[in-house]
Structure formats: structure tokens, C-alpha cells
Amino acid sequence: MLASLHSANTSQAPVAHFSSEHSCLSIDHFSLAYAGKEALRGLTLSVPRHRVTAFIGPSGCGKSTLLRAINRLHDLNESVSHSGQIMLEGHDIHNPHMNVTELRRRVGMVFQTPNPFPMSIYENVAFGLRLQQRMPKRKRDDIIEWALTSAALWDEVKDRLHRSAWQLSGGQQQRLVIARTLAVQPDVLLLDEPASALDPISTLKIEELIRNLKSELTLILVTHNMQQAARVSDYTAFLHQGELVEYGPTDQVFTNPRLQRTENYITGRIT
């Protein structure tokens, strides 16, 4: 799947566009403000299905804010206002008839710090399944094994499933959280700095996991680590001061950016 790019001009950033059949998420002139102070301004981009898209940019540029908006985690903050649209598979996620619980099942999220529940490894992965529906234990066991295998954790924990998840290392805990999210079979996985608190070996395992998962679902990765973005993502969006500056294939954004602002960030002249 190839993306076509707009020519650069002074009013619109170069962005990748995807046909509707290839697009999983579509963001159209989306803005968000906290107590009237804009954090995101007029973002328009589409996210391709079964690819890894990285959001990069300096601290405070709006990367994590956008990720949380896709999952509607701002809903409980009365000071937040927004305009524009975020469409998931053609459906407006802010439509009054949207089931937010179902949205968050379909759009799972993994945070910077691993957050396993204070229960066993097995029960962590089973948690969402038990909330969704009653099912035979054999089927639940199969799904848990599949989720842990998909998260590259099964071989490490299969003999201690009923021990506390808090006994796992930080890297294992993060993969457990990913398995917990995968168990309910999301369409999209949002990853907010998932490896920033991990050691180099655990980081490499998370990166390999990200590359492997894109055959199953769509992934969006927020990272400050540009080398990581270059290693694992297919497309990269550069945000700065709440605006989308440039968006395109990762190789092009990193080696031949179309805008000077992008080059300045990639080369360390904007921090």
C-alpha cells in the first residue's frame, strides 16, 4: 500500500493519505483544549490498517493527548473541549450513540508504566474476558494462551500462571499488559512510550512484539526515541506545538523530510 503525499505549502503540512478501504482511523480537523487552552490544533490525518504509525515530537507537543483522544480518555475531564472528528472504521467515536466501553475494547491502550492488576498472571489476562461474557473455561484458557503467546510471554510464564503478576520483571509486566489488551481482540492498539521505563533487552522484545503484531491489528506508537520510531514504524507523524507538521512513510520522514521544521527536529535542532 503506497501513500500519496500533498505538495508542501505554507498552509498545509505534507501528509500521507489512504483510501477508505485501507484506512482504519481518520482524524479530520480535530482540535482539543484544556480549560480553553489549545493542546491540539486542526489535526487531519488517516492511519492505515495493519501498519505501525509512530507519533514523534518534543515533550508537550500533543502526542499523548492525541492518543488519549482516540481512546476517549478525556471524557471525565470537564475542562476538556474538542472539535472536528475522529472516525474509527467510518464511525464517529464522539457520536452520542457510540458505546464507549465497546470503543475501548476495540481501541486498547498500553501506558508508559506497566500496570498489572494485583492478581495472578492468569487473572490479569482473563480480566477483560470475564467482564465481556460468560464462556467455558476451556475456551477462556485457549484465549489466554493465545494472548500470552502473541505477547511473546507464554513460554516464560506457562508454569506459573497462578502466581502474582507483580513477581514479573518490568519488561514481562509490560508484555502481560499487552496480552491483557489483546485477549479482548481489539482492532487498534495504542502504545504510549511502552518501552521508556524498560532495560535495553526488554525494549528490544517490545519492539519485536510491535513488528509481529501488525499482521493482526493496527498499532499507533508514541515515542520520544526517534531510533525506535525508525526501527519499528511504517509511517511517522511529526507533531510540534499541537500541530501536525509532517506525516508520511517513515523512511521518507527520517531521510528526506519535506519541511525544514521536520529536519530540524530529526537532527536535534528542535528539542
Image: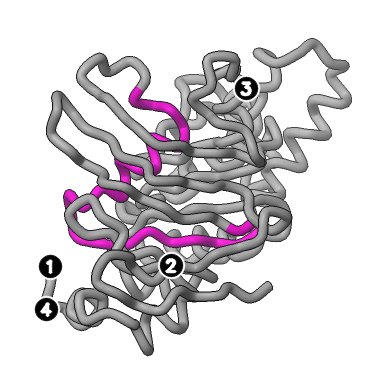
How far apart are the two marked residues, 3 and 1, measured between alpha carbons? 37 Å
Which residue type does callout 2 highlight? Answer: Val
Q: Which type of secondary structure does the marked residue at label 2 adopt? A: loop
Q: Give the percent coordinates (x, y) of residue 235.
A: 49, 68
Res. 213 visible in picture: no
Q: Is 65 a magenta residue?
A: yes
Q: Which part of the image, by quadrant, shows the N terminus?
A: bottom right
Q: Which type of secondary structure does the marked residue at label 3 adopt? A: helix
How far apart are the two marked residues, 2 and 1, measured between alpha carbons? 22 Å
Q: Give the percent coordinates (x, y) of residue 239.
A: 28, 59
Residue at numbered disc 2: 15
Is residue 27 toward the left or the right of residue 24 in the image? left
Q: How crowded is mark 4: few (under 14 residues within 10 Å), some or many (20 or more)?
A: few
Mark 1 and mark 2 in contact (Cβ < 8 Å)?
Answer: no
Residue that appears at 21% across and 52% down? 61
How far apart are the two marked residues, 4 and 1, measured between alpha carbons? 6 Å
The tag on residue 271 is 1
Is residue 162 toward the left or the right of residue 62 in the image? right
Residue at numbered disc 4: 269
Q: How crowded is mark 1: few (under 14 residues within 10 Å), some or many (20 or more)?
A: few
Which residue type does callout 4 highlight? Answer: Arg
Q: Give the percent coordinates (x, y) of residue 49.
A: 65, 55
Q: Which part of the image, by quadrant, shows the C terminus?
A: bottom left
Note whether 87 is above or below 82 in the view shown. below
How far apart are the two marked residues, 2 and 3, measured between alpha carbons? 30 Å
Task: Provide the residue span drawn in magenta.
Answer: 48-74
The tag on residue 102 is 3
